[in-house]
Amino acid sequence: MNKLKHTLYQPYKWFFFFPFIILNTLFFATIAIIIATFISQKAGSKFAAVAWARVNSFFTPMFVKVSGYQNIQKNTSYIVVSNHQSHYDIFVIYGWLGIDLKWVMKMELRKVPALGIACEKLGHIFLDRSNSKEAIESLNKAKGKLINGTSIVIFPEGTRSEDGRINPFKRGAFKLALDLGLPILPVTIIGTKDILPTNTLNIIPGNAKMIIHEPIDIQNYSENEIEKFMSDVKAIIETPLNKLPQ
């Protein structure tokens, strides 16, 4: 039955969904640019980017379940850190986390037509991973944006996991949290690797879940304890994944 469903889905994917996601990305990117330019970055994100994520999730279709909204305090800024299984993680976080977000993204994405300009107008941070000095400068520029509930999202693995298990974390998100005095908001995403596996176009409709954990107070850690900080947050994000059937 699963093989039959997969076969029947292919014409929809190739002849409707892929052209649709390209066109609606151009459309929502244009709307985001206009709103961010003439109203505000926050409005552009709320009314264009969130809609983009939800529309594409609906037409995949991907059904998202969220737990832990009570752990988000209004008007509090966070460093949001999440595991990274799939490009669909972006839809899940953008569409359902419910807070104003700035993303840290690869510099290469700035060159994507319409999308790159929209991301720049919305105030996202482009990171040149090949140049550590410029990467630090980019993160320093982000500091002034993290006020009144605007938060930054970082995938501390740096790249998508190929098997669903969490890769080693990089220090950037945790160093930034300590520098800014902002709490870490750990997020676990489940199921997206089955909807769009890494390094494929093999989209499969399915269910995803996002678990929003309690914020981590950075007052419990110092610069000398950053490895423990990383390990503790990784363990929180990893726990729900370890409970999944193998």
Image (cartoon, rainbow, N blue to C red):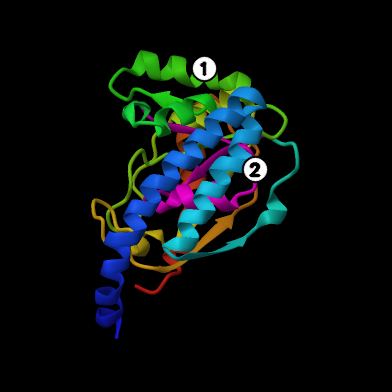
Q: Secondary structure at mark 1?
A: helix
- Asked if the magenta segment contains residue 188, the reply would be no
What residue is drawn where x is 64% and y is 24%?
Answer: 38
Residue 73 in the image, given as x and y percentages of width and height: 74, 44
Residue 77 in the image, given as x and y percentages of width and height: 67, 34
Q: Which quadrant of the view contains residue 18?
A: bottom left
Depicted 7 relative to depicted 108: above or below = below
> CA gap, disc 2 to disc 1?
21 Å
- Give the magenta range: 77-106
Find residue 140 and name its label: 1
Q: Nearer the viewer, residue 215 or 129?
A: 129
Q: Amino acid at mark 1?
A: Asn
- Asked if the magenta segment contains residue 93, the reply would be yes
Q: Nearer the viewer, residue 211 or 60?
A: 60
Indicate the quadrant containing the C terminus: top left, top right, bottom left or bottom right. bottom left
What residue is drawn where x is 27% and y is 60%?
Answer: 14
Residue topped by disc 2: 99
First reached walking from the N terminus: tag 2 or tag 1: 2
Q: Amino acid at mark 2?
A: Ile
Q: Nearer the viewer, mark 2 or mark 1?
A: 2
What residue is drawn where x is 52% and y is 25%?
Answer: 121
What residue is drawn where x is 60% and y is 54%?
Answer: 212
Q: Is residue 65 left or right of residue 241?
A: right
Residue 1 in the image, given as x and y percentages of width and height: 29, 86
